[in-house]
Amino acid sequence: MKRTTFILLMLVALFVAACTSDQGGSSASATATAQADDATPEPETDGGSESAAALPSFDLPGSAPELEALLPDEIDGAETVKFSMGGAELMADEEGSGVDPEFIAFLERLGAQPDDISIAFAFSFTEAGDSAGIGAFRVEGASSDELEREFMATMETEGEVDWQSANLAGKDVMTAADPDTEGNILYIYTVGDIVFFVTTPDEAVATELLGTLP
């Protein structure tokens, strides 16, 4: 299974956010949220938040709100945009016209059904152009070891990934250069039947994000 099956959705959203925020000062004043029910009045600013780029308004899926709720509302002081999808939405191939057989094989190896799968993302951008994101991929009932092993193997299907063990925020993680985002480091942390993944160029930000997780 291509690693883009899991990761591309977040990267596309990051790209959209970056392009929109670069269109001028008027668009940079907009904010976005993936959950309309949680919308709150935009606080007044005194100029101290200029380091974080405001995100544009656009619709994103939110099929797994309980998984989204595990992800932070801020990254390095900047508001995050969240979105999520269920297994049925991940079943379609890149043309949206059929089922990805490699995804089916992945489910079979874990003894899972499409309804057991959910994925959520939270991401943010800064004025400096740095991106940071955190995701959660859940396979209900899967063991931590098996889920981590399969997830890491998936990341390696398009090329070798040099994984290293590390400990951040008191959590044992696997880390490697992010193969999809130049300059970013990817951190993998698995607990229960959820594998969390963080991508950022800043280890301090990664430590902060990992510290928010269960």
Image: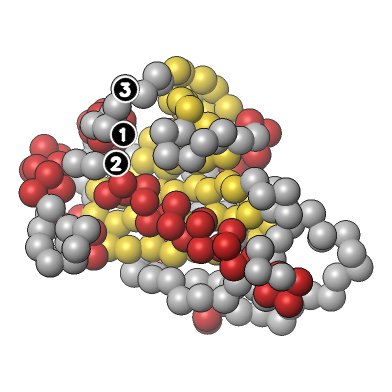
Residue lying at the far right of the rendered structure: 46
Residue at horizontal 48 percent and vertical 27 percent from the top: 177
CA gap between label 2 and label 1 equals: 5 Å
Residue 205 lies, in percent from the top left, at 65, 39
Provide residue 197's location: percent of width, then percent of height. 44, 40
Q: Nearer the viewer, residue 187 or 4?
A: 4
Chain-order first, disc 2 or disc 1: 2
The image quadrant that residue 54 belongs to is bottom right
Q: Quadrant of the N terminus?
A: top left
According to the picture, the residue beneath numbered tag 3 turns out to be 160
- For discs 1 and 3, the disc positioned in front in the rendered view: 3
At horizontal 76% and vertical 71% (from top left) the residue drawn is: 25
User: For mark 1, what is the residue?
Assistant: 155
Which comes before the other along the chain, label 2 or label 3? 2
Which residue lies at the image location 59% right of the left edge and 43% below the top edge?
Answer: 209
| Residue that numbered label 2 is attached to | 3
Can residue 194 be seen here? The reply is yes
Give the SS element for disc 1: helix
Spatial CA distance of label 2 from label 3 is 12 Å
- Tell whether label 3 touches label 1 (CB within 8 Å): no
Q: Residues within 10 Å of mark 3 (few under 14, many from 20)?
A: few
